[in-house]
Image: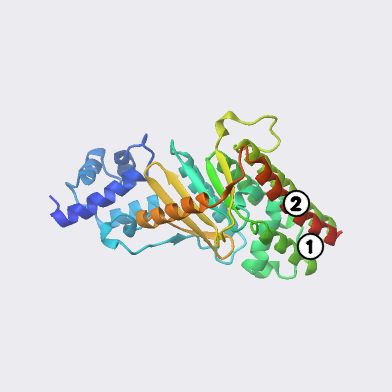
């Protein structure tokens, strides 16, 4: 039998694991599979009758993408973040997209789930429905952020990026569409992308003018798509003739006059919370620390209360916001033409 102090720590850890799986899944089945033990042995660990070994805790933490500070009150005030190391290889983005896709699929598996996204920049998921726009983002990240030597001296054209990556990005978008979300934008949310395009044009980093104009055209189309989503308060797959009933009322868009400061994503799923913070322009680090996620949720809800709803019947607010955005795009388009 475990000593009381150890039992308390282990049972806190087990309780956290229960929060991290959908209610229609069995923790005993998951543990038995991961630890290569019988279901009876798994139940003894869940009850606290058998101590988890350090190796077993490591296996469980890795599988559930958590650290001990997220599962033990003794670590209160300490927050550990995981991150996706990209390295300096051209194939790094394959692992990046696969990792994002895995996270989204895990979120989707919960019966109740929501993503709240405070967007200093346009949420990257929206780009991934447009091939040339996706290719430009990946090329920009690879050349101008990661500074990979193989991209030195190269100019952007869509064929520089593999179709495999474009398809992976599209799968990320298709999965994001199925998850209810609230996005908080402000007047500067689109400026980062416009500045990136303008910088590449002025630096001669587009292979030709038509490619630059194609990227701008797809950015404009993407914003019209977001505007239509906001109008219907629902996500949908572009090109479909009608809205999918599965996605009905799963999208809310707000305009904040308060400076957002950083891209922040909060995942809410049953008893599970995860907070993603952007770093290095496009990458993210994540924590499931309950106290930190609760503070983030409180901050985001306060930000929403001080923001203007642009979804549903808020036609005037929505029209003004996207009219200003399209005018900024048209200004850059005229400069390039």
Residue assigned mark 1: 206
Residue 8 left/right relative to 217: left
Quadrant in the rendering for residue 213: bottom right
Disc 1 secondary structure class: loop
Front residue of 96/113: it is 113
Q: Nearer the viewer, mark 1 or mark 2?
A: 2
Residue 105 left/right relative to 157: left
In x, y percent, where is residue 103? 48, 48
Residue 28 versus residue 91 in the image, above or below: above
Quadrant in the rendering for residue 226: top right
Residue 27 left/right relative to 325: left
Is the C terminus in the top left, top right, bottom left or bottom right quadrant? bottom right
Front residue of 35/57: it is 57
Mark 1 or 2 closer to N-term? Answer: 1
In x, y percent, where is residue 133? 71, 52
| Label 1 neighbour load within 10 Å: few <14, some 14-19, many 20+ | many
Quadrant in the rendering for residue 261: bottom right
Q: Give residue 326's mark.
A: 2
In x, y percent, where is residue 264? 51, 56
Residue 18 left/right relative to 160: left
The answer to whether residue 52 shows anywhere in this view is: no
């Amino acid at each position: 039998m475990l000593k009381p102090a150890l039992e308390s720590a282990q049972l806190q850890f087990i309780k956290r694991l229960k929060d991290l799986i959908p209610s229609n899944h069995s923790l005993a089945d998951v543990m038995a599979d991961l630890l290569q033990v019988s279901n009876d042995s798994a139940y003894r660990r869940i009850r606290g009758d058998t101590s988890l070994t350090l190796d077993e805790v490591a296996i469980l933490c890795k599988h559930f993408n958590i650290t001990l500070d997220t599962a033990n009150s003794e670590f209160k005030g300490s927050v550990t973040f995981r991150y996706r190391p990209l390295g300096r290889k051209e194939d790094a983005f394959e692992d990046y997209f696969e990792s994002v896709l895995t996270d989204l699929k895990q979120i989707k598996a919960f019966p109740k789930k929501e993503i709240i996204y405070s967007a200093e920049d346009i949420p990257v998921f929206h780009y991934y429905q447009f091939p040339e726009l996706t290719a430009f983002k990946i090329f920009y990240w690879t050349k101008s952020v990661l500074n990979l030597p193989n991209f030195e001296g190269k100019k952007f054209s869509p064929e520089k990026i593999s179709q495999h990556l474009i398809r992976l990005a599209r799968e990320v978008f298709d999965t994001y569409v199925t998850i209810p979300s609230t996005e908080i934008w402000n007047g500067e949310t689109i400026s980062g992308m416009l500045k990136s395009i303008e910088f590449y044009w002025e630096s001669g980093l587009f292979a030709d003018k038509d490619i630059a104009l194609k990227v701008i055209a797809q950015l404009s189309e993407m914003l019209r798509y977001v505007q239509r989503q906001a109008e219907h308060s629902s996500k949908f797959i572009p090109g479909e003739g009608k809205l999918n009933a599965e996605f009905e009322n799963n999208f809310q868009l707000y305009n904040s006059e308060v400076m957002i400061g950083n891209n922040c994503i909060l995942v809410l799923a049953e008893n599970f919370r995860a907070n993603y913070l952007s770093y290095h322009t496009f990458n993210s680090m994540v924590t499931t620390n309950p106290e930190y996620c609760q503070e983030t949720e409180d901050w985001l809800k306060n930000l929403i209360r001080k923001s203007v709803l642009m979804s549903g019947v808020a036609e005037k607010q929505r029209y003004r916001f996207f009219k200003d955005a399209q005018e900024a795009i048209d200004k850059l388009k005229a400069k390039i033409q």
